[in-house]
Amino acid sequence: MNKSVLLLRNRYLFAADLVITVLSVPIAFGLRLPYAQLRQYLPTMAGMIVAALMVKPLVYWRFGLYRRFWAYASMKEALIILGAIAVNGILMMGYYFLSFYITQPRVPLTIPTIDALVSLVLVGGLRFSIRMLSELMQARRRLPGSGATRRVLIAGAGDAGALVAREMQKNPQLHMIPVGFLDDAPEKLHQRIHGVQVLGALKNVLVVAAEHEVDEVVIAMPSASGEVFRRLSDLCRKGRLPYRTMPGLYELIGGRVSAGRLRNVEVSDLLRRAPAQTADQAVGRALSGMRVMVTGAGGSIGFELCRQIARWGPSEILLLGHGENSIFEALLELGEDYSGLALHPIIADIRDRPRMQSVFRAHQPQVVFHAAAHKHVPLMEINVEEAFTNNVVGTRNVVELALEANAERLVLISSDKAIRPTSVMGATKRLAEMIVQDAARRSGKSYVSVRFGNVLGSRGSVIPVFKRQIARGGPVTVTHPEMERYFMTIPEAVHLVLQAASLGEGGETLLLRMGKPVRIVSLAEDLIRLSGLEPGRDIQIVFTGVRPGEKLSEQLWEDETVLRPTTHPDILRLTAENHIWKPDELNRTIDSLSALAEKGEVPELIEKLNQIVDGTIGQTPPPELTSV
């Protein structure tokens, strides 16, 4: 709708308001006084009409009643109208009090109240009738025979489902008609939301869909667990009923619920957990108004950290990364979503201490999230020197420079592979944890490590590999039928990292509850089915054997470790786990290991790493890198 049309319509509204203003005064008198007495009040009415014409349109304009498209009026607009009428009523009440003592006969003091109520009915009714007319016209365009319009059943009659249904009703260009809701809450059954009835429980999806000739199911439950998603998707798949969903609760952070964000159900949806209670006030205190640095900001975890940190109102975010393209893309997306936030892209290698020193001195970050790391286990088995210099030497640079800059908080993103490491990557992450713990012990600052398992959908992770193999027609390669891992979605993991950052006292390793471990072969089967194929029939699964550096299952802590709860149910505290180093002993150890890495003396480097971190790292390069 162009501006000229809107201005034309608002001119009509302005003219209508003038007519209403003129009429409301005699209507108020007529409702309050007998007809026989009205004649003697005509001069008073004329004065009041003039006063109303001088006051009311000006107040309407000040409240923005001529700057809105009333076809999309909502409760917010209703409150604005109410506020404008209330202000007008107060102003006119002053005039009425003056006229009470000046004019004869005296005007009843109930007249201004009646006048305000009449204005409310007429002014509000005029505007909301525009919305009703608009909806009637849209409904006519959605009648059967309008082409590719789909009949949609919405799973979830909560706030998200109601918003999606409303958007379908308001936007005929979506070509979607909500025919009903499904919800497991008994009190919602047969109730209506925006005129759409709750038709049954989630388990009845196929029966309800058949009765109402449904073309598609939309799962609108951002906070639902993976178990609910799996049950619904299995039913829809068996009934050959198309289904989509909206992003999960943590994915919606900083975004909005809308029909435009619908997407196909993914494996990550099947592994969702019901959101736990959050300590938002503590996170706000830790991040609001702060200068925050994120290393590895172009990576999957790093970018999601930036996205979720941005919503807490930091004074600025420093996006530090080694890859210029990924940092540029992160900068563009964050700039679109948070236009008023100061964003500073920094291209730097965390191993380059002079460059990192100049960055810390120039920006003086108050909070640091260290997500930059080499993480691919098999690849690091044949690039040992690179793994060590990046994950250990780079971490030492970041931590020591954060101390020099007097940063209040530092959070290291660690891994479950740091427990009794059998891989070079795991050993370097364990040594990185030791660096953070040692810095916290020496400084007393809130420097902590947050340890969790695999995240779904990150670069080089299992899901992209499986998708490529399925797209090629298979086979999907899995190392071992009993191989299992902890999994969490990227948004959920980062959400808990921010919660953990606000809880850390200094020196702890904080562990995220990852739920139950998932067999990799089950993940592969789920992904094949979500692609519309059948495992074993359309796509074969081939087992290739466990690779060097890998375990059949991971753990987040040693068996003898004592864990303490925190104020967050999904975060545990692990203290005094690592070796307590003598002053400068850790630095000397890292220097000696660095010398071995620089000389390429890999066997000696691995042997010393095993001694320090109580690991069992082998020295045989993996035969291949692409199985998962």
Image (cartoon, rainbow, N blue to C red):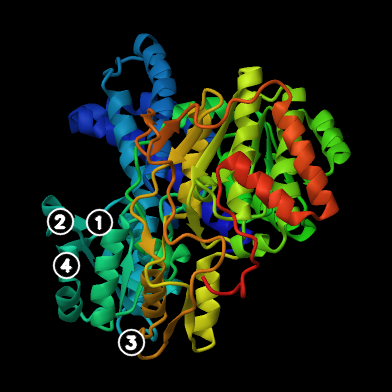
Q: Secondary structure at mark 2?
A: loop
The answer to whether the residues at label 4 and label 2 have Cβ atoms under 8 Å apart is no
322 vs 610, nearest the viewer: 610
Quarter occupied by residue 207: bottom left
- Disc 1 residue type? Ala
Q: Residue at x 67, y 22 (%)?
A: 582
The residue identified by callout 4 is: 203
Q: Which residue is mark 2?
A: 191
- Say if mark 2 contacts mark 1, CB within 8 Å: yes
Residue shown at the point (46%, 27%) measured from the top left: 281
Q: Residues within 10 Å of mark 1 (few under 14, many from 20)?
A: many
> Tag 3: Cα neighbours inside 10 Å, few (<14), some, or many (≥20)?
few
Q: Which of the two discs, 4 and 2, labels the residue nearer the N terminus?
A: 2
Q: Could you give the CA–CA distance between mark 3 and mark 4, rounded to whole angstroms? A: 31 Å
Q: Nearer the viewer, residue 570 or 203?
A: 570
Q: Which residue in the protein does label 1 denote?
A: 157
Verify CB contact (< 8 Å) between mark 1 and mark 4: no
Q: Reading the chain from its start, which is encountered first: label 1 or label 4?
A: 1
**Tag 3 residue:** 145
The amino acid at mark 2 is Gln
- Residue type for callout 3: Gly
Q: Nearer the viewer, mark 4 or mark 2?
A: 4
Say whether disc 3 or disc 4 marks the residue closer to the N-terminus.
3
Under circle 4, the secondary element is: helix
Gap in Å between the C-alphas at discs 1 and 3? Answer: 28 Å
Relative horizontal placement of residue 66, taking residue 75 as reference (left or right):
right
Disc 1 versus disc 4: nearer the observer: 4
Q: Is residue 275 left or right of residue 320?
A: left
**Quadrant in the picture for the N terminus:** bottom right
